Amino acid sequence: MAAWGTKTFEEDTANDWIQELIDSEDAREFLIDSISIDSGFLEAEQASVILAAGETLIALLDEPRVGVPNELVDWCGDNECDDVSDLPETVLSSIDKVLSEDCELNNIWAESEDYAEWQENVESMREILVQLSQL
């Protein structure tokens, strides 16, 4: 990856995903596909997409977190996406998988001196999604 940082959109896969979301014909289905996981090991790219989708759900249902690109903030403001209020609960299980040893992205970060910062960012997102799932 050319770009790499502890925030969700400080890496290329998440940023490329934004354009795919914008270009999608059915944003709700695209989000569902983005947060859906199979059992087994979770590859780094899929984990990045899950985190990007989580950030997007927060932006759609509440306010964008710091570091969300303006392009995504604008899309969320202009978007007429079908109701996504049921999706925070769905993405939470996927984020739990991202934070597990069964995830390549987590394992990569675990070897980094910035692991605690990355993990804190994901945990913070998770906490907001828990609150949104209870609304």
Image (tube, helix red, strand yellow):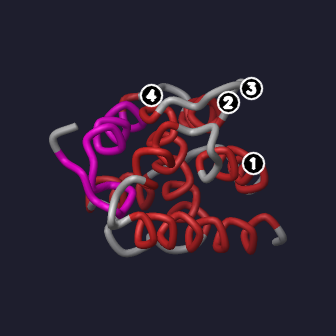
C-alpha span from label 4 to label 1:
24 Å
The answer to whether 90 appears left or right of 46 in the picture is right
Residue carrying label 4: 24
Q: What amino acid is labelled 3 in the image?
A: Ser
SS class, disc 4: loop
* Quadrant housing the C terminus: bottom right
Q: Which of the two labelled residues, at mark 4 and mark 2, occupies the earlier sequence position?
A: 4
Check contact, mark 1 vs mark 2: CB within 8 A. Answer: yes
Q: Residue drawn at (75%, 48%), measured in percent from left and top?
A: 93
- Which label sits on residue 93? 1
Residue carrying label 2: 37
SS class, disc 2: loop
Tell me where residue 129 appears, x and y as whole percent.
67, 65
Highlighted range, magenta: 3-22
C-alpha span from label 4 to label 2:
19 Å
SS class, disc 1: helix
Q: Is residue 82 above or below residue 131?
A: above
Q: Residues within 10 Å of mark 2 (few under 14, many from 20)?
A: some
Q: Is residue 16 magenta?
A: yes
Q: What amino acid is labelled 2 in the image?
A: Ile
Q: What amino acid is labelled 4 in the image?
A: Ser
